[in-house]
Amino acid sequence: MGGFAYVAARQGEAADIKPPARASEPAPPAPPPVTLPFNAKLTSQDIPVKGGGVRGGGCSGALIAPEWVISAGHCFHDIDDVRVGGRPRYHMTVTIGKNRDGDPGGVTAEVVDVRQSPLNDLAVVRLSAPVTGITPLTLVDAKPAAGQRLEFAGWGSTSATVVAPATHLKRGEFTISKINASTLEAVPVVARTVENSPCHDDSGAPYFVSSDGVTGQLFAIEDYGPECPQPGTEVLARVDVVAGWIHQQLGS
């Protein structure tokens, strides 16, 4: 009897014993912070072409207000390549807040309205939804000075022969060489490569200054330049000469 009672008690105790807790798995490393999160990649797959059919295309740009992105005016055109405003004639998707296509996060929206600048090849476009968590670039409203150094960031092609948007953000540095009535001319600080200077699909890319890689001031956007990566001068649409007009659009 005593032995039986002893065994029973030990079995009962064993029933209350729990296996030791497993060591918690280490948390995966956090993704690196996005540099220049205000950058914008614009892509379309249904741009109409003469004779029927469609083609793909892309541009670059930057966030300037929660619902607005700035880019080149010629990124939005009719079948004759004439700049047009209003609702786009084709779908244009905008991705903001990434450095690479495969980066987590970011924001994607559609262009729903285009406002063409009355002075230069520049447009501001309204997005289908506001962007939160990213600080837009501020607009410079004073005339820039020759010699001012600007940073460039765009999603254009990384090939001189194969035209397609890049899968990662390209960056370079330029210096203002000439100031015209509604445009700037800029030259690269170092020798050109397809990674540090504009190519096809870089139209609309911002030229800006930033002290922290997160916020910045926008001076101009890419209009056109030499075939990449050939030497030459980039022509940029000035922001300061249309800053008042831009603010009117953002408030409407």
Image (tube, helix red, strand yellow):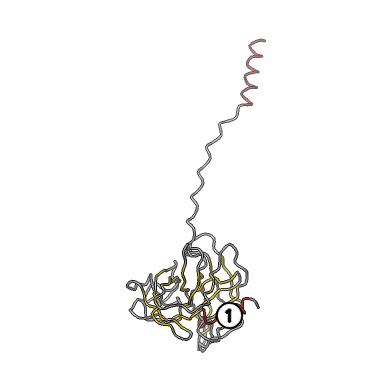
Residue 24 lies, in percent from the top left, at: 53, 40
Where, by quadrant of the figure, is residue 249 drawn?
bottom right
At horizontal 32% and vertical 73% (from top left) the residue drawn is: 191
Q: Could you tell me which quadrant the C terminus lies in? A: bottom right
Q: Position of residue 136 (x, y in %)?
A: 55, 68
- Residue at the spot 60% in from the left edge and 75% down from the top edge: 126
Pointer 1 local density, CA inside 10 Å: few below 14, some 14–19, many at least 20: few
In the image shown, does 125 or 3 lie closer to the viewer?
125
Closer-to-camera residue (93/33): 33
On screen, 95 above or below 146? above
Amino acid bearing label 1 = Gly
Q: How many marks?
A: 1
Instruction: Please say if 87 is above or below 34.
Output: below
What is the x, y in percent for residue 102? Answer: 48, 62
- Secondary element under disc 1, as helix, strand or loop, is helix
Residue depicted at 58% across the width and 62% down the height: 133
Quadrant location, the N terminus: top right
**Residue hosting label 1:** 244
Residue 20: where, in percent of width, then height? 56, 31
In the image: residue 186, left or right of residue 8: left
Which quarter of the figure has residue 22?
top right
User: Could you say which is closer to the camera, residue 85 or residue 23?
Assistant: 85
